[in-house]
Image (cartoon, rainbow, N blue to C red):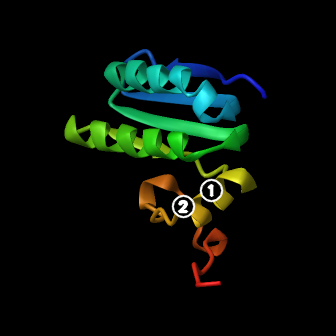
């Protein structure tokens, strides 16, 4: 299991920030993710999440992304995910039945029908 690592970059004005993640986004490693979201959204007006180098995901990460977006919206701030999605994230989205929210920046060509087996 790889550990979650991240780098938070906030511009000097506090207007925008970006968090670059690497490693695992599984429940066992999710606490640093939650803390980075809380710290970063409190320091910036708009936050971008980059999980392009993450190796594994589970529903706990997806729940945190949704909570981040709701929290940011309630504070009149922005939060979105950069359009660099590993296949494992897209697979989680398909299997979970979670809507492909616009702020997730998932290209329509990457979405697939969620038909019944």
Q: Residue at x 52, y 22 (%)?
A: 31
How crowded is the residue under tag 2: few (<14 C-alpha within 10 Å), some, or many (20+)? few
User: Which quarter of the rendering shows the C terminus?
Assistant: bottom right
Q: Is residue 115 above or below residue 93?
A: below
Q: Nearer the viewer, residue 13 or 87?
A: 87
Give the Cα distance between marks 1 and 2. 6 Å
Quarter of the rendering containing residue 37: top left
Tell me the SS state at disc 2: helix
Q: Quadrant of residue 56?
A: top right
Report which quarter residue 102 is drawn in.
Answer: bottom left
- Residue 87 x/y as whole percent: 74, 56
* In the image: residue 40, left or right of residue 112: left
List x then y, in percent, for residue 42: 32, 21
User: Mark 2 — residue?
Assistant: 96
Q: Quadrant of the N terminus?
A: top right
Q: Circle 1 is placed at which residue position? A: 92
At 49% from the left and 37% from the top, the residue drawn is 48
Q: Nearer the viewer, residue 55 or 105?
A: 55
In the rendered image, residue 8, in percent from the top left (x then y), is placed at 55, 20
Please tell me whether residue 72 is drawn above or below residue 106 in the rendered image: above
Q: Is residue 91 left or right of residue 42?
A: right
Which disc, if any, is residue 44? none
* Residue 100 spot, x, y in % from top left: 48, 64
Q: Is 46 on the left-hand or right-hand side of 50?
A: left
Closest to the observer, 7 or 117 = 117
Q: Residues within 10 Å of mark 1 (few under 14, many from 20)?
A: some
Q: Residue furthest bottom?
A: 116
Q: Does the residue at mark 1 contact the one at mark 2 (Cβ under 8 Å)?
A: yes
Q: Residue at x 43, y 61 (%)?
A: 101
Q: State the residue at coordinates (50%, 66%).
A: 97
């Amino acid at each position: 299991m790889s550990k979650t690592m991240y780098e938070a970059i906030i511009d000097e004005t506090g207007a925008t920030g970006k968090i670059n993640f690497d490693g695992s986004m599984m429940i066992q490693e999710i606490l640093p993710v939650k803390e980075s979201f809380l710290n970063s959204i409190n320091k910036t007006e708009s936050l971008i999440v980059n999980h392009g180098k993450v190796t594994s995901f589970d529903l706990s990460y997806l729940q945190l992304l949704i909570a981040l977006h709701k929290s940011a919206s309630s504070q009149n701030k922005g939060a979105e995910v950069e359009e660099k999605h590993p296949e494992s994230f897209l697979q989680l989205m398909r299997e979970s039945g979670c809507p492909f929210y616009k702020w997730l920046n998932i290209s329509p060509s990457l979405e697939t029908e969620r038909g019944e087996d």
